[in-house]
Amino acid sequence: MPTPREKYASKVYLNFKEIGEREYQTIVRFFETHEEDIHKLTFEEYFELLMAYTDSLFEIGAYSNYINTCDLAIESTIHFNVKIFRGENIYQKLLFRKAASCYHLMRYDEAEHILQELVKINPDHKLAIRFLKKCKVSRIPKIVQRTRAISIALFFFSAVVIGFELIYVETLLSEYLEPVRLSRNIIFGIGMFMLLGGEIWMRHSVESKVDELVDSVRIKKSEHSSESV
């Protein structure tokens, strides 16, 4: 990794600046082709190219490569104490996109852990809070899996009853038509109730847990600020 004092002829950097900011594929190819020379640039130039490369990897959906490169970028921000880059908190941006990459790769546990750490750093990060809730919803609890399975079974059974009603009851057992219709409506209603009830419970549980986390972090930060004063 280059240090701020290292110098190198910046022809590579000038060639990079000729590439459009949204030409993500071109940026990725350029960085990977000239990586050895890029590591010899001054830190400022190197860091700019590294950020452009990581952003481009994310934009083209190369999430595995992004995660690997993101760790290097995070290490650089910490080592050289880079807090703001182009008006953004670069550390928080990298963490958020790393979580998003894990999510796209269906690595939900990792995504959730990263988002929880990000919320602990900044409990006012609204995108991270919403994304954490979405991530938790993606990890369906066993109880909700069961309610969904039972609901599907009840819907299927209700369909079987309807078939039985149409084939046999209406033609041969008409005196039982009303009880059969009532039965299949009750079965269908129970299935719908369990399905909606499980979903509502899950989302309410997720909302409560994340909101509790955010509130606890805010209280701790407020207490720490008071002690510092």
Image: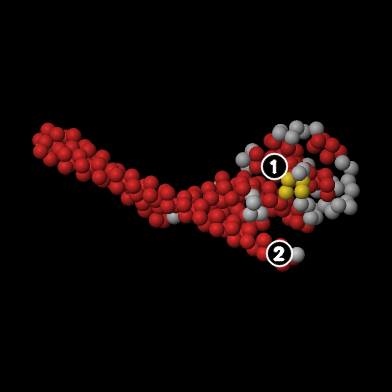
Q: How is the image coloured?
A: secondary structure
Residue 216: x and y in percent read 59, 61
Q: In the figure, is residue 120 to the left or right of 173?
A: right
Q: In the figure, is residue 169 to the left or right of 37?
A: left
Seen at 42% across and 49% down, the residue is 200
Residue at far bottom of view: 227
Q: Which residue is mark 1?
A: 55
In which quadrant of the rendered image does the C terminus lie?
Answer: bottom right
- How far apart marks 1 and 2 lie (CA) works out to 38 Å
- In this view, the residue in front, 11 or 96, is 96
Residue 54: x and y in percent read 70, 44
Q: Amino acid at mark 1?
A: Asp
* Pointer 1 or 2: first along the chain: 1
Residue 84: x and y in percent read 77, 48
Q: In the figure, is residue 146 to the left or right of 11?
A: left
Seen at 71% across and 62% down, the residue is 225
Seen at 39% across and 56% down, the residue is 143
Callout 1: helix, strand or loop? helix
Residue 157 in view of the camera: no
Callout 2: helix, strand or loop? helix
Q: Which residue is mark 2?
A: 226
Q: Nearer the viewer, mark 1 or mark 2?
A: 2
